[in-house]
Amino acid sequence: MRKLENSELDRKSIESFKKSEKTPLILVLDGIRSLHNIGSVFRTSDAFLIEKIYLCGITATPPNKEIHKTALGATETVAWEHHENVLEVIANLKNEGVTTLAIEQVESAIFLQDFKVDTKQKYALVFGNEVHGVSQEAVALCDGAIEIPQLGTKHSLNISVSAGIVVWDLFQKMNWPG
């Protein structure tokens, strides 16, 4: 077994990334304090050709040196917008026919492994603040909620880790169903 060289990885250029068909997933980050978490979500979004990221409230925006440390250029490829009010973003997405899902521990949440993807549907995944999670107002506005099952003592994951887990799960269900 031999580790591949970067030149062997067939990486897309920024231009070809922008022209590529995107995964029908939109990420909504609300009130994310850590610039490294934001950068990490951009990098994950680049890896899985995510359609767009909405940065809401106090969530910082590119260009930013600290975001760049973990994004490693993904802020140049992944489309993004900043909006002050996450509730307006969720409402607008719903009006466009996008299914909005809070990634949160709430009553009636569907465990991630049980969530069935409709390959004809576009989804927006709402991730909340590192301490408080997705606000109750945002949860109430969403079409549903997905919970990542956790068996330890903490029952919380870093937002960038949660985003990676959920994005990968939905990505693989969309691309390799069954």
Image (cartoon, grey):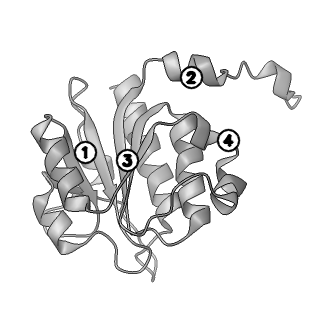
Q: Residue at x 56, y 36 (%)?
A: 46
Could you tell me the amino acid type at mark 4?
Gly
Q: Which residue is mark 2?
A: 17
Q: Which residue is tagged 3?
A: 27
- Label 2 and label 3: CA atoms lie apart by 17 Å
Q: Is residue 90 left or right of residue 124?
A: left
- Name the residue: 40% across, 38% down: 52
Residue 73's disc is: 4
Residue closest to the eye, 33 or 142: 33
> Is 152 placed above or below 52 here?
below
| Residue positioned 81% across, 19% down in the render | 8
Q: Secondary structure at mark 1?
A: loop
Please give left or right for residue 39 compared with residue 95 in the image: right
Q: Quadrant of residue 85?
A: bottom left
**Quadrant where the N terminus is found in the figure:** top right
Q: Position of residue 70 (x, y in %)?
A: 67, 54
- What amino acid is labelled 3 in the image? Leu
Q: Amino acid at mark 2?
A: Phe
